Image: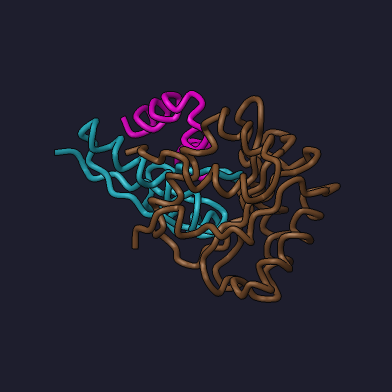
Amino acid sequence: MNKQKLILVACGTGIATSTVVCKKVEDLIKANGINARIIQCKISEVSSYEDQADLLVTTTISSRNYKFPVVNAMNYLTNINPGKVDQGIIEALK
Amino acid sequence: MNRSIKEFLRRDLVVNNLEAKSAEDVFKKISPILLEAGFVEDSFFNGLVSREDKFPTGLSLGKYNVAIPHTDAIHVKKPIIAISTLKNPVKFNSMDGNGSVDVSIVFTMALNEPHSQIVMLQQLMFLIQNEDTLESMLKAKDSDEVYDIVSSFNYNCE
């Protein structure tokens, strides 16, 4: 089995939109048999996971570059082309 | 704690045809109502402004756009959603940082528990994805009608 991946799901406050996105990402990794765990946090907390995380999924602006890929998940909220986000997440975890 | 959106709505926290010149102006008008009703702290207004500045909440949906301003839990006493339909759209910055969005309906969320209220949040997203519902909210004759539209919406999203 592959090493478990760590996905960060972040928004500005870590309260609202990241909660919705977390659920979507959970469903997505389950449906695709991806071995990953998810941490929900504020965008300001992301850097503390810099060395552990494999992917950041966020609804908000990520103002800096990280060592891992970043996928914007605003489309999960608007449901406009959510497949693009699905694809981005799956690609990033390959 | 998985409460339905209906439990976060109050008839007296719905304002229709709000006249506002900017996002900040919307916050200026909505914050005192939430404060008066006992849901937020004095600091809620400043919290909204600074959070919106750093992490904007405008969502582009097509015909009618919405914003879902909210702020850190320390400014909130009890969770609630205040709804305002705007007489004229005002500009909010887009959540993803790509420009601005002309927003017609503002759902101001006072939330104080991280990682929870998932059902309510999913229901709210489901509601805003329905263009016909947004249109009927904007055409409503008064705030009671707006409240009725949102609370009687079929949230069978899961």
Residue B55: x and y in percent read 64, 51
Q: Which residues are magenta?
A: A66-94
Q: Does B141 sit above or below residue B51? A: above
Q: Does B112 sit above or below residue A73? A: below
Residue at (13, 38) in percent of width and height: A1
Whether residue A70 can be seen here: no
Q: Does A70 appear in magenta?
A: yes
Chain assigned brown: B
Residue at (46, 54) in percent of width and height: B6
Whether residue B139 can be seen here: yes
Q: Which of the 4 image quarters holds residue B66?
A: top right
Q: Quadrant of the C terminus of chain B?
A: top left
Please state which of residues A52 and A36 is positioned toward the viewer in this rendering: A36
Residue at (62, 57) in percent of width and height: B82
Image check: A8 left or right of B141?
left
Please state which of residues A29 and B18 is positioned toward the viewer in this rendering: B18
- Chain A: its colour in the image is cyan
Q: Does B27 appear in magenta?
A: no
Please state which of residues B157 and B10 is positioned toward the viewer in this rendering: B10
Residue at (58, 45) in percent of width and height: A60
**Callout count:** 0
